[in-house]
Image (spheres, coloured by chain):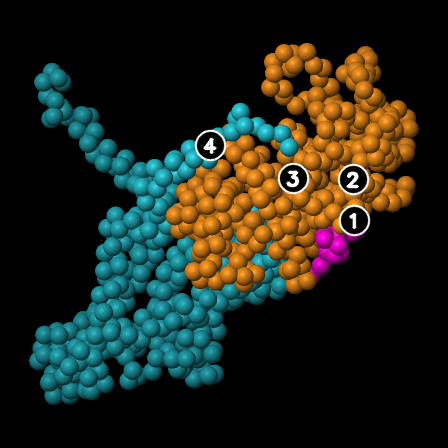
Chain colours: A orange, B cyan
């Protein structure tokens, strides 16, 4: 759909990282879901452009955070990288191997190295199976340990994630939300993967439990040298765990870069608006800061806006924004790793809220 | 990475909470079901009746040893009266009387139970295995496989089964194998349809995606992840199909296309008995009672298991029971003076 050719490479974080340090490279990945008429003859009447031309890089032992609101395509991107759904176009490279759209059998060795933690700890564990059997699933599927050896490893894992190994024979329903998520972590950890894709792993948990699980994930990363793709809609959670951050809007990355740069000096008006909407813990700060309130809803991904996808809601939008699609590139003295897809990036000290007010008036 | 130690909660605290909860014994679904079933008097009575029937069927040769009346031996002298008719219960060592050719009716009913229960259980087992497999595949794979299997299921369900059964019995000749084949063929479709529907909803759950992300193949997912969630409805359906299969077998035998004489079956005993109903009531009543009690017991057991598996239905019944009890207590306070508190009424 884009007339402008796709980004030639992940200008994002790719340029300054040596190739040997790259664990996952996602090049121009696109995922469209066909919209079909119901009935006997199912005509395709449209495409939900869930992920459109996304490129990113996950370095070894680091965490890449992906933020965006509901429907921005972050979970679809995660499933494309995990090989759970085939991609429409683009390429996913894991540890130097092209793993795009591999068959289930060919994917099997990769599965041992890429694991997932799911959002809902209540629906991601089979209610009819005992915890030991759930955590033991990876061993059974990949036939790496059997019998007493498997049980020993499962109990070791349970202990490692902060569960009582004696609860081996319990059902998931007998655990709290936080404990259930620990079970999910143990299952993901079982085969000692290199990459764990965390799809909103804490958004269903209480704030205090969120901290426990996040600290557990951080500890595990240090101990096992894990890389994380960390998806969330909570900006503070992403900031806490991530080394670099990508912001998604309507299936595209609109800004990405090191965590400090993106949070410190957001360039894309959408990032700025998101950051201004995040609750601040300090009441003085909360009272003094300016919120940028966006109007309207996220447009339908079946028929996304032309040009910059954010332009109908952007306080800084000008005619150019609706005509030409902005490319991800470093803006106004940013480091090469901090890239933004915006024709008119936010400059330091700019009062976007005021700009928005004047536009409305 | 920044630290949020100020809101860090000690994992030890969580462990302590877990330990105190450890004293509450975890119960599996089956333990809970059994506890609920145990408090259901009707279901317990049904289980006892079913067990007695199975016990009698297994012990049939022992009764032969006691009565010295093999099932296929006729006793024209002691077993028939002067008119050549069957003798009544208790006569000449025949506990439930004799049949039209002077054979021991009790022993023949026991041997009929062996056939009926065997056919009922075997056909239900075959039908359940086939129905679960077909339903799982149709639901899980979807697409063309689902279209073909689901339409085939509908076709089998829509088929006039008695007509097909009669035709097959005529063409292939009546035998135990044909009967088991025919009844099994009609047993799987109902189970397949229910299993398919449940599979469609369960396969969208996140834990199925989790299994796929671990690299589990379709058959592992179907039988290790989906099937455990389906065992409850399948068990209920299977329990309720056994009496249907028993009746089906009796029907075929009654029509002369099932178990062939001299092998005893409740169906062919009843078919013979209809010539004697005016003179020998026991000849009709006892085999019919055996059939009635057995199917009723299996049906009540199936209902009990269903109530125990799905506590919501049980609560509805319990609620009705409680309401009835309350009504009974409160009724006296209406037109009549309350016998409990007469002083206050005055």
| Residue A289 percent location from the top left of the image | 70, 14
Viewer-side label of 2, 3 = 2
Q: Secondary structure at mark 4?
A: loop
The local crowd at label 2, few if under 14, some if 14 to 19, many if 20 or more residues have their Cα within 10 Å, is many
Q: Residues within 10 Å of mark 4 (few under 14, many from 20)?
A: few
Magenta range: A89-103
> What residue is shown with label 3?
A230
| Relative image position of residue A306 (x, y in whole percent) | 85, 35
Residue lying at 26% horizontally and 58% vertically, measured from the top left? B46
For label 3, the crowd category at 10 Å Cα-Cα, with few meaning under 14, some 14 to 19 and many 20 or more, is many
Q: Is residue A107 above or below residue B315?
A: below
A67 over B346 or under it: above or below: below
Left or right: A217 as drawn, with respect to A336: left
Using the image, tell me which numbered label, if any, was put on residue A19: 1
Which residue is label 2 attached to?
A13
Q: Nearer the viewer, mark 2 or mark 1?
A: 1
Viewport quadrant of the N terminus of chain A: top right
Report helix, strand or loop for mark 2. loop
Looking at the image, which residue is at 12% across and 88% down?
B77
Q: Mark 3 or mark 2, which is nearer the start of the sequence?
A: 2
Residue A94 magenta-drawn?
Answer: yes
- The local secondary structure at tag 3 comes to strand
Q: Which chain is mark 2 on? A: A
Please indicate, yes or no, whether residue B105 appears anywhere in the rendered image.
no
Q: Chain of mark 1?
A: A
Location of mark 4 (residue): B10
């Amino acid at each position: 759909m884009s007339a402008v050719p796709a980004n030639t490479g992940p200008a994002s974080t790719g340029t300054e990282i040596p190739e040997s340090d790259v664990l996952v490279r996602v090049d121009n990945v696109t995922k469209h879901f066909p919209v079909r008429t119901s009935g006997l003859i199912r005509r395709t009447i449209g495409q939900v452009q869930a992920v459109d031309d996304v490129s990113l890089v996950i370095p070894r032992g680091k965490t890449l955070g992906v933020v965006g609101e509901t429907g921005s395509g972050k979970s679809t991107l995660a499933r494309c990288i995990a090989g759970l759904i085939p991609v429409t176009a683009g390429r996913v490279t894991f540890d130097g191997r092209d793993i795009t759209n591999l068959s289930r059998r060919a994917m099997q060795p990769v599965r041992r190295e890429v694991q997932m933690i799911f959002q809902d700890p209540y629906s991601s564990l089979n209610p009819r199976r005992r915890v030991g059997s759930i955590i033991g699933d990876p061993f059974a599927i990949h036939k790496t340990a059997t019998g007493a050896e498997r049980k020993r490893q499962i109990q070791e894992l349970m202990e490692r994630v902060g569960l009582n190994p004696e609860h081996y024979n319990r059902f998931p329903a007998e655990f709290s939300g936080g404990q259930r998520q620990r079970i999910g972590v143990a299952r993901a950890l079982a085969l000692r993967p290199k990459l764990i894709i965390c799809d909103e792993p804490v958004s269903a948990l209480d704030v205090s439990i969120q901290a426990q699980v996040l600290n557990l994930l951080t500890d595990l990363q240090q101990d096992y040298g894990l890389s994380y793709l960390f998806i969330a809609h909570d900006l503070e959670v992403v900031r806490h765990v991530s080394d670099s951050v990508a912001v998604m809007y309507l299936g595209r990355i609109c800004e990405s870069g090191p965590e400090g740069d993106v949070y410190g000096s957001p360039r894309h008006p959408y990032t700025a608006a998101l950051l201004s909407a995040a609750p601040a813990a300090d009441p003085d700060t909360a009272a003094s800061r300016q919120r940028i309130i966006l109007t309207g809803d996220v447009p339908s991904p079946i028929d996304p806006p032309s040009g910059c996808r954010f332009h109908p809601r952007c306080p800084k939008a000008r005619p150019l924004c609706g005509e030409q699609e902005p490319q991800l590139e470093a803006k106004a003295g940013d480091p090469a790793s901090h890239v933004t897809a915006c024709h008119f990036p936010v400059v330091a000290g700019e009062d976007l809220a005021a700009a928005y007010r004047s536009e409305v008036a | 990475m920044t630290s949020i130690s100020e809101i860090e909660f000690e994992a030890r605290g969580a462990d302590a909470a877990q330990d105190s909860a450890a004293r509450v014994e975890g119960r599996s679904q089956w333990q809970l079901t059994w506890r609920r079933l145990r408090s259901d008097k009707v279901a317990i009575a049904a289980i006892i009746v079913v067990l007695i029937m199975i016990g009698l069927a297994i012990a049939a040769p022992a009764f032969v040893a006691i009565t010295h009346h093999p099932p296929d031996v006729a006793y024209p002298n002691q077993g028939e009266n002067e008119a050549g008719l069957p003798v009544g219960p208790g006569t000449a060592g025949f506990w439930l009387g004799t049949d039209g050719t002077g054979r021991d009716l009790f022993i023949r009913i026991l041997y009929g139970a062996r056939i009926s229960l065997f056919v009922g259980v075997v056909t239900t087992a075959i039908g359940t295995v086939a129905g679960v497999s077909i339903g799982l595949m149709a639901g899980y794979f979807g697409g063309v496989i689902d279209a073909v299997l689901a339409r085939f299921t509908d076709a089998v369900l829509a088929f006039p089964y008695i007509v097909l059964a009669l035709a097959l019995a005529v063409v292939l000749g009546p035998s135990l194998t044909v009967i088991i084949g025919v009844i099994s063929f009609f047993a799987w479709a109902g189970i397949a349809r229910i299993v398919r529907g449940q599979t469609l909803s369960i396969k969208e759950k996140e834990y199925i995606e989790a299994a796929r992300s671990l690299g589990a193949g379709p058959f592992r997912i179907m039988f290790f992840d989906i099937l455990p969630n389906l065992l409850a409805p399948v068990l209920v359906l299977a329990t309720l199909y056994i009496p249907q299969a028993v009746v089906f077998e009796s029907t075929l035998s009654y029509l002369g296309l099932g178990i062939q004489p001299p092998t005893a079956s409740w169906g062919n005993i009843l078919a013979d008995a209809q010539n004697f109903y005016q003179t020998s009531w026991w000849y009709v009543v006892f085999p019919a009672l055996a059939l009635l009690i057995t199917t009723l017991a299996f049906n009540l057991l199936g209902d009990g298991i269903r109530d125990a598996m799905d506590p919501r239905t049980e609560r509805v019944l319990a609620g009705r029971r409680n309401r009835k009890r309350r009504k009974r207590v409160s009724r006296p306070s209406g037109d009549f003076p309350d016998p409990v508190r007469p002083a206050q009424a005055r």
